[in-house]
Image (tube, rainbow, N blue to C red):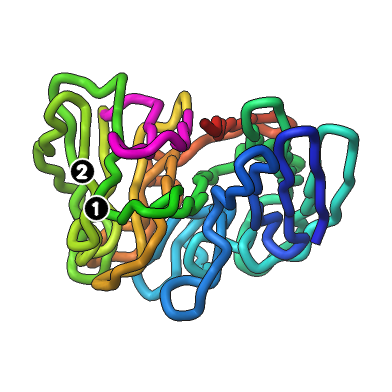
Amino acid sequence: MVTLENEKYLIEVDELGAELSRIRSKEYDLEYMWLGDEKYWLKHSPVLFPFIGRMMDQKYLYQGRLYGMSRHGFAPTSLFSVQKLSDRVICTLNAVERDDFPFDCTFEMSYILLSDGIDMVARIINRSKCGMIYTYGGHPGFNVPLEKGLSFDDYHLYFPEAGKKVYRKLFGPNFLDSGMKEEFSLPNGRLDLTHSLFDNDAVVLENSGSVVEIGSDKGERSVVVTYEGFPYCGFWHAMQKDAPYVCVEPWMSMPGPEGRTLVLEEKKDFIRLEAGGINEHRIGIRLK
């Protein structure tokens, strides 16, 4: 575990999975990030790469060859090398000649500590001699409630950039992408939190903008997550439980299709990166 702090915040990053595992406010003596509990969920902020979510039978096809891949890709279970600088922690993984992924690449996950929060920056370098196909997503979990005396139901999600029509992406019986969506109501850009909202897994929204705030009309503390360039954002806690946290999950793509094996070349919402190319994806966390 690597610890980094400035005058206002202390963060911890785990070498396993390059996972941000703690955000503590010194000013308010407040833990913003979910610290994990086996009753609900032991993780904190998994890094989703090079796949998001599940695939049928945890397998996919590329150029006619069948590969296996665990849920959310190999990043969450990989050991990263870590470099600590004055204002950031940089986690690096070289994925070369893997049995579960046909491309050579370097994946860097940086956590930049700021005066008002943290930037999470994923950097992908394609070291293959051909184009690379991948996706990326974040999964940070935040404590709800954030203040004593408040309850989970006192909180809401606020989407200041939500479009006139917001859609919820629908999952099939195996929690895979059904290819369908339905209109989803966000009155005044707001979604009140209830535990029952997550009884059937994540709520994944499209056209809800690139900013969401977790806050309460009864409290002062809040979390703002920004995710420019991510077409989807999911919201989740452990299904059918009274879990005291919410995960904000910006996704570059949807999981695998329901009822059939994912064919990598056909996955239109995955990212294509040319040989030698470099991409960056940034998620911002601002704390109030």
> To which residue does mark 1 refer?
153
Vertical comparison of 249 with 186: above or below: below
Packing grade of label 1 (10 A; few <14, some 14-19, many >=20) is: some
Q: Residue at x 14, y 20 (%)?
A: 164
Which of these two is toward me, 271 or 79? 79
Q: Is residue 215 magenta?
A: yes
Q: Residue at position x 12%, y 29% from top?
A: 187
Q: Report the residue that reaches farthest toward the front.
A: 149
Quick check: 274 above or below 163? below
Res. 97 image quadrant:
bottom right
Q: Whole-percent x and y of residue 282?
A: 59, 31
Q: State the image coordinates of residue 249 (x, y, percent, origin top left).
A: 43, 46
Please report the residue visible at 48 percent of the width from the left and 51 percent of the height from the top: 142
CB within 8 Å, label 1 to label 2: yes
Q: Secondary structure at mark 2?
A: strand
Residue that label 2 marks: 192
The x and y percentages for residue 48 are: 54, 53
Q: Which residues are magenta?
A: 208-226
Amino acid beneath label 2: Asp
Foreground of the two, 17 or 22: 22
How many labels, in total?
Answer: 2
- Residue 8, located in which quarter of the rendered image? top right
Dot 2: few (<14), some (14–19), or many (≥20) neighbours within 10 Å?
some
Q: In which quadrant of the rendered view does residue 39 lie?
A: bottom left
Name which residue type carries label 1: Asp
Q: Is residue 8 left or right of residue 269?
A: right
Q: From the viewer's perspective, is the residue at label 1 or at label 2 nearer? A: 1
Residue 15 visible somewhere in the drawing? yes
Q: Secondary structure at mark 1?
A: helix
Assign the N terminus to one quadrant of the image: bottom right
